Amino acid sequence: MFILASDALTGNSGFVTGTIDNQVRQLAEILSITATITKEKSAFKCMGFKGTQHKTRGWSGTGSITLYVISSEWNKMINDYVKTGKDYYFDMVVTNEDEGSTAGTQRVALYRCNIDALDIARFDANADYLTVSSNFTFEDTDLLEKFNYQFATN
């Protein structure tokens, strides 16, 4: 079995939607996004076994996002927290789909996302485009739609 090159997804094929303040919109300013689930484990030792075993006891969801500086919405969320203490939690759905691939579509939901930090002002005379990056956390996830790829055999 192998993968056909024509079925590999291109990196910019897809989109991200977000629900912020009960409004759903495409987050077109996103240049890149990565979400990672890290399992939390405890070491387990016992007599008769010289190695260390590990038991999963939970997980943590973290991510990183890079945005084009074109919207003040993200700055507003951070500024509202500074001024009023209102923190924003929002949901995102990351969709990967490439019309040139037979892999189909994958949609992953990230729930209760919260930005960790954000540069609220940026200027760079040497930059072709202004971007800003941030880390975020999320508290739940769902695989809403799975790829349906069939590996090639010959």
Image (cartoon, rainbow, N blue to C red):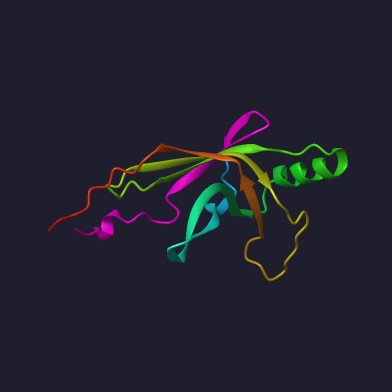
Judge whether 131 appears above or below 87 on screen.
below
Residue 4 forms part of the magenta stretch: yes
Left or right of 35? Residue 10 is left
- Asked whether 34 or 72 is in front, the reply is 34
Q: Is residue 12 left or right of residue 118?
A: left
Relative to 11, is 31 on the left or the right?
right
Question: Residue at (36%, 42%) from the top-left corner?
Answer: 105
Where residue 55 sits in the image (x, y, percent)? 50, 52
Q: Tell me, yes or no, whether the highlighted magenta stretch contains residue 65.
A: no
Q: Position of residue 139 (x, y in %)?
A: 60, 41
Pinpoint residue 21: horizontal percent, then vertical percent.
68, 31
Please tell me which residue is depicted at 27% across the width and 47% down the height of the picture. Answer: 149
Name the outermost residue toward the bottom: 126
Residue 35 appears in view: no
What residue is shown at x 30% (from left), y 47% (from top)? 103
* Magenta-tinted stretch: 1-25
Query: Please, which residue is most extreme toward the left here?
Result: 154
Quadrant housing the N terminus: bottom left
The quadrant in which the C terminus is found is bottom left
x and y percentages locating residue 17 in the rendered image: 54, 39
On screen, 79 above or below 3? above
Q: Residue at x 27, y 60 (%)?
A: 5
